[in-house]
Image (cartoon, rainbow, N blue to C red):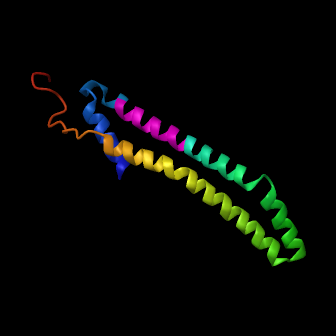
Amino acid sequence: MVLQLLIVIAQTAAPADSLGVASGTVVFLRSMGGAFGVALSGAVFTARLGGDTVTSLAAVARRMRDPALAASSHEAVANAMTAVFTTGVPFALLAFAAVLAVLAVTPRSRLVPDGRA
């Protein structure tokens, strides 16, 4: 819901001859933010998980059929996911504050100013 609103705000704030640039910039920055967010989440997950911990524990648990080892690997993944979401909360709050800080912009009633065809 917020993403489309940001495009409208960018188009409203941009001059009429730069609407495409404004839209493209918003989409580009959204894509880059998503790429950096996924990279950061993956780095936190991998660092918290400790490398091949889950893979080795799951393989051992399958061979030995030991529920304790399987539970240990599940716990390791759960702890890593908790770290990912805990790291993401400040960024989500920062994004929320940035959206609230956007000034109310009155939409244009016309795309082309009077006097121009």
Q: Does the magenta stretch include residue 41?
A: no
Q: Quadrant of residue 113?
A: top left
- Against 58, is 39 above or below? above
Residue 24 x, y percent position in the rendering: 40, 33
Q: Quadrant of the C terminus?
A: top left
Residue 82 pos. (x, y %): 61, 60
Q: Quadrant of residue 35?
A: top right
Estimate the x, y position of residue 29 in percent, counting from the top left: 46, 36
Residue lying farthest to the left in this orientation: 115
**Closer to the camera in the image, 101 or 3:** 101
- Identify the residue at image location x=46%, y=35%: 28
Q: Which residue occupies the foreground of this view, 60 or 76?
A: 76
Which portion, as a residue range, is magenta?
22-35
* Horizontal side, residue 82 vs residue 9: left or right: right
Q: Is residue 76 left or right of residue 36?
A: right
Extreme-right residue of the structure: 64
Q: Count up the numbered dots.
A: 0
From this viewpoint, which residue is outermost toward the top? 115
* Residue shown at the point (85%, 66%) measured from the top left: 59
Q: Is the magenta region chiefly helix, strand or loop?
A: helix
Q: Residue at x 35, y 49 (%)?
A: 2
List x then y, in percent, for residue 64.
Answer: 90, 75
Q: Which residue is drawn at 37% across and 28% down?
A: 21
- As drawn, is 28 to the left or to the right of 68? left
Residue 32 part of the magenta-drawn span: yes
Compared with residue 62, is residue 54 higher up or lower down, i.e. above or below? Answer: above
